[in-house]
Image: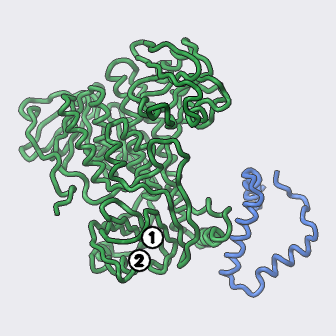
Chain colours: A blue, B green
């Protein structure tokens, strides 16, 4: 099951690190960074069902 | 030197049928390409008279299909053509992927050991056709009822409840024929399909590929090299693959908005190849073509007494080698069914399962082929971003490599869910479940697949079954294998169990299996596998 309750320790720190990653990059570079990040995280999760749930949740539809 | 594809292999000869009106044949095949010839050989080997009509008299021009997978090679073994294919073909199992200027990674396709045939060979299609024609000649010499009629162009077809009638043009004028069954193997632009007005819908990919076969002395190894966005073909893809006789297949993506006639001219092709192969490379162009492709299929492959097989029924992108390979699996599936129907041993509804099983196979191929194409040719900015992300990560991290898709190479279709399968209640190995093609294995002094096929068989392992059974006229023979004879065989057919009975179809697919012999169960399974229960 996709975890949709708070699960990241130091949430503010993580968010800042994510923004730092994109600091001083062009839109094109940022898009590539995001894509690589999605793929790395998806592989780490590895659970096909959870990935589908995340894809659905990302659509922001009920 | 005259190339094989320039020599008439089945020149026009007047047939006695041209001097009488409407001779009826049990089976007529249209098209003497790999699929039509395979169908005809399969029929003739089982003594079903067959006439093959082709509007040409030569094997196909240029290399065309070059990559033949293990399962089609096994089918060609059953048709008596496997040895020349494998002897002549280039065996390969290493692939390299390049992105931009860098080699991203290298992979090994080496299938698990213990199969008579390799995972793949590369061989020009004209050699396959030549070997098939040789096999036809061999069968003719043995007195088998098979005939190829060159320069016999079908100009009209009419379907009836009990037959199909054909009008045929020849250099000496037209004649008519009747066929109880017609197999249309006349390619992606199938005139048969057009004349009968059947649809052929699917997805068109807006892209052009330059395909060039060059003869060169080169040190490239027998590997498949695939480039995404190489410096010599910016923003596009490229493929290099070795064939016998020093012939190399080169595939260059050109994009959609090009002048095809201009791009095909040697003065435009040669600089592109030089950029890829190096300024010093010495090569001759054997064949150049530009193609676009579609992924599509007919809604149904059976229309009464007309059966479509190969590219006439379905078309895929070339990435994945799923064209000729799947066509051979079509006829493998069709011919034993047609034989039982012609012999009155099965109802003609058995042929509806040709449709369901091979439509299932075609869907699998179209799915894989469309996914490869979407990876190779990203259709949007975001799909290119993800594609490039996968390739960049693949160089450093193993996890991303399975996502790289330069063609998912043809693997045999497992007919899961087919109505011909008897539901499996065993815990025998997954890979040999009902619907799967038999997995080859070395036995004491022969290969398993060399002992299977052409009729129903029981594979009795560590338990006994009668030598043969007669199920309403269908003969079932038993092949016994002792556990311990071959560890590979035991792994594939027994797993943790100590005994098993497999019912094999004439196309070497598993129809049913049990851990112990039970005659009633076997009889039911044979009836089920022939659409009688």
Quadrant location of the N terminus of chain B in the rendered image: bottom left
Determine which quarter of the picture holds residue B90.
bottom left
Give the residue furthest to the right: A10
Q: Out of B10 and B446, give the one closest to the viewer.
A: B446
The disc placed on residue B274 is: none
- Label 2, on which residue? B276
Chain assignment, label 1: B
Reply above or below: B34 against A7.
above
**Who's the residue at 53% across and 38% down the image?**
B414
Q: Is residue B239 visible?
A: yes
Spot occupied by residue B521 in the image (x, y as percentages of width and height): 56, 15
Contact, CB < 8 Å: mark 2 with mark 1? yes
Q: Out of B171 and B408, give the one closest to the viewer.
A: B408
Q: CA distance from mark 2 to mark 1?
A: 9 Å
**Who's the residue at 54% across and 27% down the image?**
B421
Query: Is A35 left or right of B18, judged from the image as shown?
Result: right
The disc placed on residue B238 is: 1
Of label 2 and label 1, which has the lower sequence position? 1
Q: Is residue B207 visible?
A: no
**Who's the residue at 9% across and 41% down the image?**
B13
Spot occupied by residue B264 in the image (x, y as percentages of width and height): 30, 73
Mark 1 nearby-residue class (10 Å; few <14, some 14–19, many ≥20): many
Element marked by disc 1: strand
Chain assignment, label 2: B
């Amino acid at each position: 099951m996709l975890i949709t309750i708070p699960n990241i320790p130091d949430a503010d720190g993580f968010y800042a690190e994510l923004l730092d990653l994109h600091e001083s990059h062009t839109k094109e570079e940022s898009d590539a960074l995001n894509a690589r990040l999605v793929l790395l995280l998806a592989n780490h999760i590895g659970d096909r069902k959870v990935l589908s749930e995340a894809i659905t949740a990302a659509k922001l539809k009920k | 030197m005259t190339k094989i594809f320039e020599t008439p292999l089945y020149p026009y000869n007047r047939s006695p049928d041209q001097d009488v009106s409407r001779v009826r044949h049990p089976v007529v095949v249209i098209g003497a390409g790999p699929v039509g010839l395979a169908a005809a050989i399969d029929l003739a080997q089982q003594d079903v008279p067959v006439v093959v009509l082709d509007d040409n008299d030569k094997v196909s021009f240029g290399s065309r299909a070059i990559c033949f997978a293990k399962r089609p090679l096994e089918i060609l073994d059953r048709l008596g053509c496997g040895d020349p294919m494998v002897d002549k073909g280039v065996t390969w199992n290493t692939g390299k992927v390049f992105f931009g200027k860098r080699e991203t990674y290298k992979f090994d396709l080496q299938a698990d050991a213990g199969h008579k045939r390799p995972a793949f060979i590369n061989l020009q299609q004209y050699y396959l056709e030549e070997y098939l024609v040789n096999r036809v000649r061999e069968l003719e010499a043995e007195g088998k009822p098979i005939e190829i009629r060159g320069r016999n162009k079908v100009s009209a077809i009419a379907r009836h409840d009990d037959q199909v009638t054909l009008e045929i043009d020849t250099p000496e004028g037209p004649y008519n024929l009747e066929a109880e069954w017609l197999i249309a193997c006349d390619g992606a632009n199938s005139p048969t399909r057009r004349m009968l007005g059947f649809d052929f819908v699917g997805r068109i990919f807006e892209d052009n590929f330059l395909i060039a076969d060059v003869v060169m002395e080169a040190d490239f190894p027998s590997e498949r090299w695939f480039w995404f966005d190489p410096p010599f073909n910016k923003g596009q893809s490229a493929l290099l693959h070795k064939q016998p006789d020093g012939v190399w297949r080169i595939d260059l993506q050109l994009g959609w908005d090009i002048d095809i006639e201009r791009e095909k001219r040697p003065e435009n092709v040669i600089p592109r190849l030089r950029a890829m192969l190096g300024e010093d490379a010495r090569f001759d162009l054997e064949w150049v073509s530009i193609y676009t492709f579609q992924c599509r299929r007919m809604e149904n492959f059976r229309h009464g007494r007309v059966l479509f097989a190969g590219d006439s029924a379905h078309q895929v992108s070339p990435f994945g080698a799923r064209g000729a390979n799947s066509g051979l699996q079509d006829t493998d599936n069709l011919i034993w069914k047609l034989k039982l129907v012609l012999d009155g041993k099965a109802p003609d509804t058995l042929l509806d399962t040709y449709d369901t099983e091979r439509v299932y196979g075609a869907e699998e191929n179209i799915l894989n082929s469309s996914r490869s194409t979407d990876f190779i040719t990203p259709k949007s900015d975001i799909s290119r971003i993800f594609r490039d992300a996968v390739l960049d990560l693949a160089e450093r991290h193993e996890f991303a490599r399975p996502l790289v898709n330069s063609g998912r190479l043809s693997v045999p279709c497992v007919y899961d869910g087919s109505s011909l399968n008897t539901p499996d209640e065993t815990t025998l190995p997954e890979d040999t479940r009902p619907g799967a093609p038999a997995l080859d294995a070395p036995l004491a002094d022969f290969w398993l697949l060399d002992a299977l096929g052409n009729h129903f068989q029981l594979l009795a392992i560590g338990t006994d079954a009668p030598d043969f059974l007669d199920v309403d006229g269908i003969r079932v023979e038993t092949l016994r294998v002792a556990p311990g004879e071959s560890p590979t065989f035991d792994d594939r057919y027994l797993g943790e169990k100590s005994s098993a009975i497999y019912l094999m179809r004439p196309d070497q697919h598993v129809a049913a299996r049990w851990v112990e012999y039970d005659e009633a169960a076997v009889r039911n399974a044979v009836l089920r596998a022939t659409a009688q229960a």
